[in-house]
Amino acid sequence: MTRRVKNILFVMCDQLRADHLSCFGHPTLKTPNLDALAARGVIFDRAYVQSPVCGPSRMSYYTGRYVHSHGASWNFVPLKAGEMTIGDHLRPLGVRSVLVGKTHMRADLAGMSRLGIDPASTIGMRIAECGFDPYERDDGIHPYSGHDPDPNYNDYLRKQGFDGDNPWEKWANSTVDDEGRIRSGWFLKYSNRAARVPDEHSETPYITRRAMDFIAEAGEQPWCMHLSYIKPHWPYIVPEPYASMYKPEDALPVVRSEGERRDPHPVYGAMMNHRVSRTFSREGVRDAVMPGYMGLIKQIDDQLGELFRFMEARGLMETTMIVFTSDHGDYLGDHWMGEKDLFHEPVIRAPLIVYDPDPRADATRGSRCDALVEAVDIAPTFLDACGGVAVPHVMDGRSLRPLLFGKHPSDWRKHVVCEYDYAFQDSRIELGTPSRDAWLRMIFDGRWKYVLAEGYRPMLFDLASDPHEFVDLGAAPEHEHERQRLHEALFRWARQPRQRVTIPDGAIETMEIQPRISEGGILIGYWDEEDLAEARKHFKPRFASTNPLVKPTLDRLIHPEGATHDQ
Amino acid sequence: MTRRVKNILFVMCDQLRADHLSCFGHPTLKTPNLDALAARGVIFDRAYVQSPVCGPSRMSYYTGRYVHSHGASWNFVPLKAGEMTIGDHLRPLGVRSVLVGKTHMRADLAGMSRLGIDPASTIGMRIAECGFDPYERDDGIHPYSGHDPDPNYNDYLRKQGFDGDNPWEKWANSTVDDEGRIRSGWFLKYSNRAARVPDEHSETPYITRRAMDFIAEAGEQPWCMHLSYIKPHWPYIVPEPYASMYKPEDALPVVRSEGERRDPHPVYGAMMNHRVSRTFSREGVRDAVMPGYMGLIKQIDDQLGELFRFMEARGLMETTMIVFTSDHGDYLGDHWMGEKDLFHEPVIRAPLIVYDPDPRADATRGSRCDALVEAVDIAPTFLDACGGVAVPHVMDGRSLRPLLFGKHPSDWRKHVVCEYDYAFQDSRIELGTPSRDAWLRMIFDGRWKYVLAEGYRPMLFDLASDPHEFVDLGAAPEHEHERQRLHEALFRWARQPRQRVTIPDGAIETMEIQPRISEGGILIGYWDEEDLAEARKHFKPRFASTNPLVKPTLDRLIHPEGATHDQ
């Protein structure tokens, strides 16, 4: 039996913390379907995203490139037309890449206009959808009825009798209070109440069914489907039975210390001052939110169970690589923060599970891998699984398949990097930082986490002695050595360019281009005919130009004609 | 009289050293026409190119971006489709950007194919020509008759009776020896002999006339013409009277010391071992080459005199900004090197002269400016001169106009940077460096020049005590402080991203985007209706969304309806 990768199911959750799956150790939130996937695949215990917010993190997943390389540094920054995505890399291999769900992509309309690309053309649609063909796009954030586009999910809800301009908001993301009044799921206070739609009509089951629709229709062409759930991202609201499945006491204890609020790093201090951070630091907020957040995750796990059974019944588990991950985590009040604007473990550690049907992966099934892995490794893994040639001149990441096959490359990375452009945030305005300098960059070697903050002292955490990251050693004189070491490693990272994307490294390595140029006609540095004749004796055949005119021309240059004769 | 910039004449020579113009101090090579331009404009004494070779240097001129940003790191690396060039920036301002001469551009055909752009379309042609509309392209390097394309200049020569497959090579870049035999100008030995065409039919006058043709035809639309001479680049061969105008003793003395060959930095050592370096270090080579090189420069100066008089006669000097520069210099045997693969002053210092007709520039006419200026400043200068808004999120450089107007911005740069990707060179093969690590990066603060060489110790030169750069202090313990300082400055440079090109900095600075987002509909971190009602009191009007649906929706969220009523 040859179980080779034909298809790829690339599942992403939004804002799912790694520690909220039972296979990652959650004591009360049981995720048996993901646990079962992990039992057939590998759990990556030290997988990190490239940015703590949706847009840039996703663009790194979709391009295999650091934010430093692709440039889409925040949610509303379009990925520039021309950046290569998973779809671009897999298409020449005959693999169809499709989107079911969210990408958080902003289309680079100015770039398309400059390049003469019609946004309504196939290529234009792909540029606007991170390289995927949109089977069902649903970015899920539609607080006003004037939103554009009206997602298909709204149409679906209306057909089920959930009416209005924006049933996504009015029904799926609203609840009813004890007095019978509709309350918006945007308000955290209502996160522990049931959504106004039954489970089957809520967004996660809807999107899952759409994924099944695609699979049923896909036919024989290999595919890579990006099944991208909006949840457990806010609004943190879920229907029954999930809404009342968890109590506040089922939640992991909040991780924060009073010490963190005493004289914090200025950027951290400003971020603790974001409204969402202040709200999550209030008494009672977590008690309302955690049941909703956990219920949303439980619902995803149940739905993935449905999907996996659907695939199993069609024999697709034998031929489909499955990657499950998230674009980032959620502070949920940890470290006196809400949302995801810094680099603590709850935010940047990804819940990564990879199932590879290839028999070479049998050796690692059910195991955990502690290699330092990054979001940029996903696209190279897909390229590898589909039989493509690695493109290290384009992608910053590396294929995970050696790790999946039980190998541990000796040159595997020693650090992960995460970047955050907080130019768009209140904290930048509060601090008065120019937008161009509002950058934070983190490097983590598995123990020491160093954060370079333009214009401020760095931050430093020792996760060995301080696993909760309570003690910022960024100014501690005794740790100057660690700071310098990681600072230098970050420089090494920053100067590894991934902008020379138009010539593969392999072409350079094998052509030994300078001799080729010499034979090819740019005759640099020859004194006279004898010089060239002598040099030609040493040209290796494989360097020789394929131009049939080269040899006679060089011959002629070496054996000059008479001028009068030649005229 | 308002003398405003309407047109731009952007003259570039190839491989012209700054010290080979009389206005830059050459004692015997008189360049009165460029000297006269300098007398009306400003000489930049400390202007530096972004890379010591043609392709990447030119792409930095054409994009306003460091090699680190644009990625076209060597001659044969295509500038990726989507990179914005001078043409892209000036076109929306109504300015037509045209090419007359050389760009060394390689078209990104793979990128165009991926983006569905026909290379034969207008946009495709521009992508293939660095954003310029090609009026006359001539890259000049055509050693074989199988070259593609056959330049118009070849047709021109044939019409004058200079026949053959490749008259560029056979006539314009060949000579006749004392025995009447045709000798190729590729051989350095013949550089002091006359080309086989008369002056008027040689390449520099031909290209100059083509520039005049364009001007005569241009009509009323403002233009930016890139007049890009192939010369004094090799083949170092020029017709009479220039061929016999200079003697070896007219040349600047060679700058090299025996000390440089003793235990050199490994990369420098490998580059001294390039064939062209070995050839230029041989006795007699400079004596043959220098007369040809100097004659080619003199010919350019004479031709520019013709062009300037042509423009003067049409009143164009009143409305045309003129920039004269070069893509890099030439070792010509200095430092035991040929060509241009490292960062010594003869190679990276550009002969930059800028004439701005604007009356605000009257204060600086005929003056010299010692600000640290870079090739990336040219595109922003053009954008500024044409009335465009600066794009610091795209361009690494800054407009020179404040300097031209006699101002000295207090935040002007303190360093220049030059990069070299030697992956394609013999030296990399000799050293066994992986192609991805074959990077050299230089930072220079006007006195100290620091070169970071991946995998090797750095180089360091103190131009105050050692103006000829003979003494590499890269390993000298007493200069650790300078090395660390410049190393850190280079890191600061390397992490300034110019990849977030799709959102202008100004948009971020003025939108104060987070409050806008709050009013705009993503209601992050509100506990309940009261929270939102309170926050809305503090929204400043200018942050308010322009979406007419926002206010009623927020009103409704705060004042919930009855569920039964609403259904």
Image (tube, coloured by chain):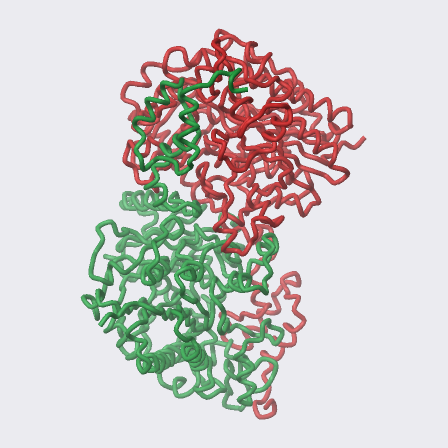
Chain colours: A red, B green
At x 47% / y 41%, what residue is drawn?
A72
- Indicate the quadrant where residue A402 lies: top right
User: Which residue lies most toward the left here?
Assistant: B363
Q: Quadrant of residue A438?
A: top left
**Viewer-proximal residue among A558 and B196:** B196
Q: Position of residue B20 (x, y in %)?
A: 32, 73
In the figure, is residue B65 to the left or right of A502? left
Residue B518 lies in what quarter of the image? top left
Residue projecting furthest to the right: A1
Relative vertical location of residue B264 with respect to residue A373 in this rendering, above or below = below
Residue A326 seen in render: no
Position above or below: B207 against B453: below
Q: Is residue A394 left or right of residue A491?
A: right
Where in the figure is residue A446, as x and y percent of width and height?
A: 47, 26
Direction front: furthest residue: B565
In this rendering, the count of numbered labels is: 0
Of residue B325 and residue A546, the one placed in the foreground of this image is B325
Quadrant in the picture for the N terminus of chain B: bottom left
Q: Quadrant of the C terminus of chain B?
A: top right
Q: Is residue B471 above or below residue B101?
A: above
* As drawn, B62 above or below B289: above
Percent from the top left, x then y, of residue A513?
A: 57, 60
Q: Would residue B520 be seen by someone viewing this image from the given angle?
A: yes
Camera-nearest residue between A560 and A472: A472
Q: Could you tell whether A530 is left or right of A287 in the image? A: right
> Which residue occupies 61% across, 65% down?
A539
The percent position of residue A149, horizontal first and vertical second, equals 54, 37
Q: Relative to the observer, which residue lies in front, A38 or B166?
A: A38
